Amino acid sequence: MSLQTVRQFFADRAPDIEIIELNQSTATVALAAAAHNVAPGQIAKTLSLKVKDEVILVVAKGDARLDNKKLKSAFGAKARMLSCDEVVTWTGHPVGGVCPFGLENPLTVYCDVSLKAFEEVLPAAGATHSAVRISPERLAELTEATWIDVCL
């Protein structure tokens, strides 16, 4: 079902963007980078976090790590990663297919400036074997994301 909500998202907002579906899993950055023949950093990973009482998504380059000090400075509180069950409940997407498109619930999306190192990034598309090719700027525009600097 998750892949369908992402399909609908792109049909409504960006019909020119094609969802890439592979026969192999792209559920991790390493698997996705190998499958798409790109550097791990070019995979745009979507992290599901809870800050205070709000669930947010942070999209960052695949080989970036969250910096807890930067996160706390940006949001005024510590952040914690959601559990696998919480991720599915909030986003509607399975772990390994989480993306900021076609969400089950409206969530605030942030794009880490680390994405700007690439002309094109590959976020998942709602399933562990799907992705899209998109510029970081277009990703941020389509998801109404705010740019932020929270990674190392």
Image: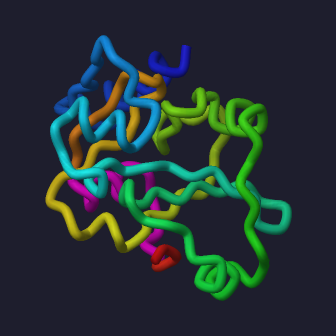
**Residue 116 at x, y = what percent?**
26, 69
- 125 magenta-colored: no
Left or right of residue 98, residue 80 in this image: right
- 142 magenta-colored: yes
Task: Identify the residue at horizontal 85%, vertical 61% (top origin).
Answer: 53
Left or right of residue 101, residue 138 in this image: left
Left or right of residue 53, residue 144 in this image: left
**Residue 5 at x, y = what percent?**
49, 23
Q: Quadrant of residue 51?
A: bottom right
Closest to the observer, 146 or 22: 22
In the displayed structure, 118 sits above or below 86; it is below
In the displayed structure, 125 sits above or below 44; it is above
Closest to the observer, 41 or 53: 41
| Residue occupying the far right of the picture | 53
Q: Quadrant of the N terminus?
A: top right
Task: Identify the residue at horizontal 27%, vertical 25% (top origin).
Answer: 19
In the displayed structure, 81 sits above or below 37; it is below
**Residue 67 at x, y = what percent?**
57, 77
**Residue 38 at x, y = what percent?**
18, 45
Q: Which residues are magenta?
A: 135-148
In the displayed structure, 114 sits above or below 69; it is above
Q: Quadrant of residue 71?
A: bottom right
Task: Identify the residue at horizontal 49%, vertical 44% (top origin).
Answer: 100
Task: Identify the residue at horizontal 47%, vertical 27% (top origin).
Answer: 126
